[in-house]
Image (spheres, rainbow, N blue to C red):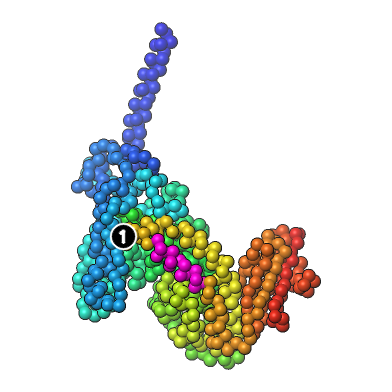
Amino acid sequence: MKNRRSVLLGLTALCALLGLLFLENDDEYTELVFSAESGFYEEPFMLELHAPVGTEIYYTLDGSEPDGHAIKYTEPILIDDATKNDNRYALRTDVTAGYMTELIGLYNTDLLPPGYAVPDYPIDKCTVVRAAYVDEEGNLSGIKTGSYFVGFDEKTGYEGLNVISVVTEPDNLFDYDTGIYVLGRTYDETFDSAMSQRHWWQWGGNYHQRGREWERAASIQIFSPERELVIAQDCGIRIQGGGSRGRLPRSMSFYAREEYDEDGRFYVDLFETGYRADTVTLFAGGDDYSTKLRDKLVSELAKDRNFATMNYVPCAMFLDGEYWGIYWLTEKYDSAFLGYRYDVEKDDVIMIKNGLVAEGKEEDLDLYLEMRDYIAGTDFSVPGSYEDACDVIDMQSFIDYYAVEIYIARGGDWPTNNFALWRTRRDGGDGYRDGRWRWMLYDVNSLSLSESLIQTDTVSYTRDYDYMFDSLCRSEEFRKQFALTLMDLANTCFSKESVEAYIGNAAGLMAEPMKAHNQRFFGKENEEVYRSAVEDIRIFLENREPYIAQYLKENFGLAGGLARVKVEINDTEAGNVIVNTAKIPFDEENIWRGDYFTDYPIVLTAEAGAGYRFVGWEKDGELISEEESLVVSFEEEEISRKAVFVKGD
């Protein structure tokens, strides 16, 4: 009896304690709290919302900002697979002129309509919950946003991708006057006979508007391929791009600012570079809407060259809860990016984009114009002039950048447009603080890397349209370095082996997601279109080298022919070998082969790894040099050298 009474007393005390804890916990809420974090869930669940005592919670499920007129929270919210809900924003046809097939047929007689289709099936969706509370004095709290994906383990098209949920007041996107994603008032007020002569994607629309005035507040949540929440942050969003703004879907830039979030930067390093950006871009692929691979591919292949490139993270995006396609999350070139990447003061950065000041002061444009006119107007056939130019621009950066663009047959709006370069305002410093101009790669998604361009003489084309490049081509020193660099690219980063590895990985990753993307925007998976477009890139890169070599010979007046170079290494773990400007990618047999013009000797440089030392260069099994750098002239039909390393310091 005594034991039973003790148990009852114990249970009573426990219940009392739990009650006190419950009251204490209820009083502890000093802010709005969701009972479940944004994320992926296998099964439906009930979401509870908690706020400070004496307040009332209001919420929305359509992305709109909650206030006292929203749904009043009185009971937990069922979070289920929202895909079965009716499509809402995806039904809109005012988001691009591409839906205006009759007008396109009337004014763009040389073009076929893009074939956009409103989805006639329930597209994938997540549940977006936005909530705020009102206190006893009628004050509205800040808004809390959650994105919930239920049952996505059974959905296809997301494997290997990050998932981004972008949530904003729908009027920010679709309002006739202020929406940044629609044709809107801008179209109605600007479409005239002159505008009608332009391509449909260039017809005026709200989405072509630029600047801070057209930035809208939003909340983003990013999830890793493993479905872990990477970041949840308020920021600003804008439409990004040039002509691609008219296409569907379109790129967006995200801006972290103190007005949205006190940090003023994104909380995490989104690209694993050590840099927390304040601006990033969700890139839709530009004109490369069939594969979305060109920009990432070239940036990956040329990432070790002496110009700036971006990192690319594959993503699927949900806009106010609805599936909105496939993108690349990329860095954005600005003074903060350049300051971190090159260890310079961001306030000292001058960045020129398309001939205008993108970062810096208005008067900094004079520094660019002075450099441009100097390079374009100098007679570089005069001895010593080339060396002087190297004090003004980082010549290897210029050569690397132009060699890559020329190799991929970039044309159309390049080199007169879509170019960027930077320098520090002050000169005379060390490293990248020396005030010399350096180049930046972006937007290679149109008129490049296509089978139809394999035989294009981009060397001659670039000389015709770029006065700086043409002027420098009159220097023998420049022609030598450019020829060596271009062949370095052909033999290393653009070699068949390198290309196949990168294309295979990227194309494989995007194959299934692109089927879902195409179904969403074009009404069919277009699987064969995607495969054909990827094959178009592969065919170009596998067949470009002989043509680019021919044009190099013709434009630079080279007298020699191509000779084969064979380099072997005894142990790829022991070190690296550099040929002129490029690291050699050895095959499984520790051998590399490349072709070079006999006009210029090549330089082989051995670099020992940690715990190893370089012994020397062998020819036909005999040691011929112990120097790390070896200059090799083409006195033989085929050059063969072997780099030998051993363990030890």
Q: Assess disc 1: are there few (<14), some (14-19) or many (≥20) residues with their C-alpha within 10 Å of its C-alpha.
A: some
Q: Secondary structure at mark 1?
A: loop
- In the image: residue 645, left or right of residue 486: right
Establish if 414 lies above or below 328.
below
Q: Which residues make up the magenta segment? A: 527-541
Q: Amino acid at mark 1?
A: Gly
Q: Residue furthest top?
A: 1
Q: Position of residue 78 (x, y in %)?
A: 29, 40
Name which quarter of the figure residue 397 lies in: bottom right
* 539 within the magenta span: yes
Circle 1 sits on which residue? 523
* Quadrant holding the N terminus: top left
Establish if 279 lies above or below 74.
below
Question: From this viewpoint, is residue 220 visible?
Answer: no
- Say which residue appears at 71% left-offset and 74% top-offset: 640
- Say which residue appears at 38% left-offset and 15% top-offset: 8
